[in-house]
Amino acid sequence: MVSPETEKKSDKTGRIFKVSNATFLSATVLDMKSTVDILNHPTCAHRADYTVLTCGYRGIEKGWTGKMFGKRNVTAAVVGNTLLNAGIAYTSWKLYQRGGKWNRKFATALLLFKTADNAMAGFRNVRYSADLDHNLGTAMDYSGRIHWSH
């Protein structure tokens, strides 16, 4: 017979695991969306009067998929990272299902670690996109509004 204290602890661990799964999914979506946005960014920058400032901007994937499959391959970046994250989610789920205090703690820690990694990559991508106009304007000695086109 299971004591009420043990049941409360396992229920708390179960909730923490479910929350870590949800945050893991959210961080994965943020990372993939921001990666696609950078890799599909328009390539030509124009001044406010639409004269060409520069062409040839290329966003690149700086993670492991960029090193393995090419820095501009959108499909490889998204599919590779999604498969890695699915493997981590499956591994943590299997560890959690095995039961035991340390298996469950390790499964939750694994998800939280990868959540932090995905969130940092996503925020880095968002910051890179946000700073792009400023950095290009500074490099081209232009302080006006920049319009982008393909």
Image (cartoon, rainbow, N blue to C red):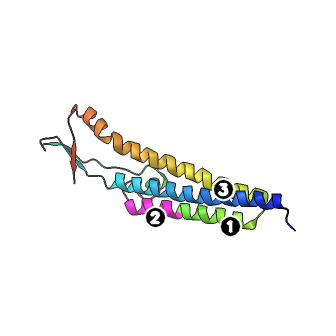
- Give the foreground label among 1 and 2: 1
Question: Foreground residue, 101 or 11?
Answer: 11
| Residue 2 x/y as whole percent | 85, 65
Dot label at residue 126: none
Tell me which numbered mark, 3 or 1, is placed earlier along the sequence: 3
Q: Is residue 113 magenta?
A: no
* Spatial separation of the CA atoms under disc 3 and disc 2: 28 Å
Q: Say which of 26 and 58 sits in front.
A: 26
Across and down, in percent, residue 85 comes to 55, 60
Whether residue 66 sits left or right of residue 94 in the image: it is left
Task: Say what amino acid the circle numbered 2 marks.
Answer: Val
Classify mark 3: residues with Cα within 10 Å, few (<14), some (14-19) or many (20+). Answer: some
* Pointer 1 residue: 94
Local packing at callout 1 (Cα closer than 10 Å; few below 14, some 14-19, many 20+) is some
Residue 23's image quarter?
bottom right
Q: Which residue does the image show at 51% across and 49% down from the upper left?
A: 119
What residue lies at 38% left-to-right and 60% top-to-bottom? 74
Extent of the magenta region: 68-83
Mark carried by residue 16: 3
> Is residue 72 a member of the stretch shown in magenta?
yes
Question: As shown in the figure, which amino acid type bears the numbered disc 1?
Answer: Lys
The dot on residue 79 is 2
Considering the image in quadrants, where does the C terminus appear?
A: bottom left
Earlier sequence position, callout 1 versus callout 2: 2
